[in-house]
Image (cartoon, coloured by chain):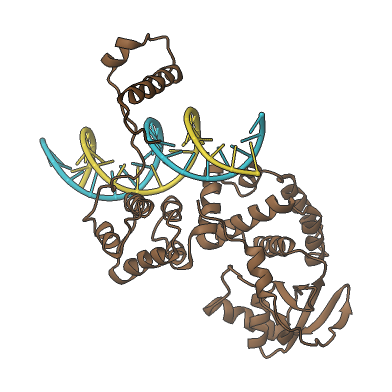
Chain colours: A brown, B cyan, C yellow
Amino acid sequence: MAKPRVLVEDFADMLKFEPEPKIAPTPVQGGIVEMDFDLMESFPNHKFKLYQGKQFDDMTDSIRLYGILQPLLLWHTEDDRYIILSGHNRRNCGKAAGLTKGPVIIKENLTYEDAVLIVIETNLRQRSFSDMSQSERAYCLFEHYKAMKSQGRRNDLILEIERLMNPQDSEAFTTSAEISKSSGSRSKLAEQYTLTEDMLAKYIRVGEYLDTPLMEKFDDNQFTISVANTLSFILDKEKQQTVASFMESDNYKVDGTKADLLRSYYENNKLTDTTIVQILTGEKTRKPKSNKPQPVKIKPAVISKYFTPQQTQKEIEDVIDKALALYFENQGSEVTA
DNA sequence: TGGGTTCGCGGAAACTTTGC
DNA sequence: GCAAAGTTTCCGCGAACCCA
């Protein structure tokens, strides 16, 4: 299996830069300060869809009328950068409404995992999991799971964010407390998102391995999570891109069978542009001959000549193994492992 | 040893085809 | 047009395997 992407390192690379002097934010009240939009940076590798069209216009109109009511949440990094954890849309629409600055809450001393967790939690609080696109769900679950695995779920952090974002809403504490019960394991995570563990595993895998071009097709409901999961076994990004390109240009649909074939051809190093087209057009319907040794069936009549019905499969295999070793020893033939 | 991954299989639902 | 039969697709379960 290919090595998983190490996002923390990617992120560290992104942070390598010469820090510029920042203008100190203006204090307002209750930990909220005013800050220039130009000093804020988007969260690196931000996967959540930002408002466009009517949603963008509606929020811009609202900000023009009432201003930005809920402060943005920023991460002040050790190298003096201000990265948006929550509020990308408010920043963008605020700018469109003619504002140059907005209210923010600044968080310090966060690890990357903390920051990811906050990005996910705040997005989940603004809209439900079921409202998210497929790619957002996959990203959300993958990052959530990774953050949980690396440090355990930071319920203290989540509660603090909840307090900062909903200071007047006591109900919110109940919600968060309920969520905080679901911590620690894959099954608890599945429970929290009301998914089966199988579905959760598929989303996590898709979030980790399915690249943008196919993820966009997934978002367009051109295939299901099962198909996306199968396609995620094609670890070569270029091959994934090629599949997506053919789907785009020729309107090919990928169902479970075709996804299985694409995966099989990839795993046998036989996935070329030609085979991709042949699979997508339905011209190829059979899996390639596997490079792995295939299991051999021995007829019951042969088995019964040498073994009793009481003997287990393991015992039978051991005897056959020893017998073959003796056979090839006497033959003087090469025995390949 | 426990948790995670993969694979194959089966059930349920959706869809298509066929016969009347 | 409708019902029955057949086929396909999707999802979940369980077993085997892997790995730290």
**Height in image: A129 above or below A198?**
below
| Residue A239 appears in the rendering | yes
Place of residue A218 in the rendered image (x, y in percent of width and height, measured from the top left): 44, 61
Please say whether residue A133 is visible from this viewpoint.
Answer: no
Quadrant assignment, res A88: bottom right
Q: Nearer the viewer, residue A263 or A131?
A: A263
Image point 83% across, 64% down: which residue?
A: A168
Residue A242: x and y, percent?
36, 67
Residue beneath the point at 32% across and 15% down: A303
Q: Is residue A134 left or right of residue A113?
A: left
Q: Nearer the viewer, residue A305 or A300?
A: A305
Residue A25 x %, y %: 84, 83
Quadrant housing the C terminus of chain A: top left
Q: Residue at x 58, y 79 (%)?
A: A56
Instruction: Say above or below: A264 vs A11.
Output: above
Work out whether C11 lies above or below A85. above
Residue A226 left/right relative to A129: left
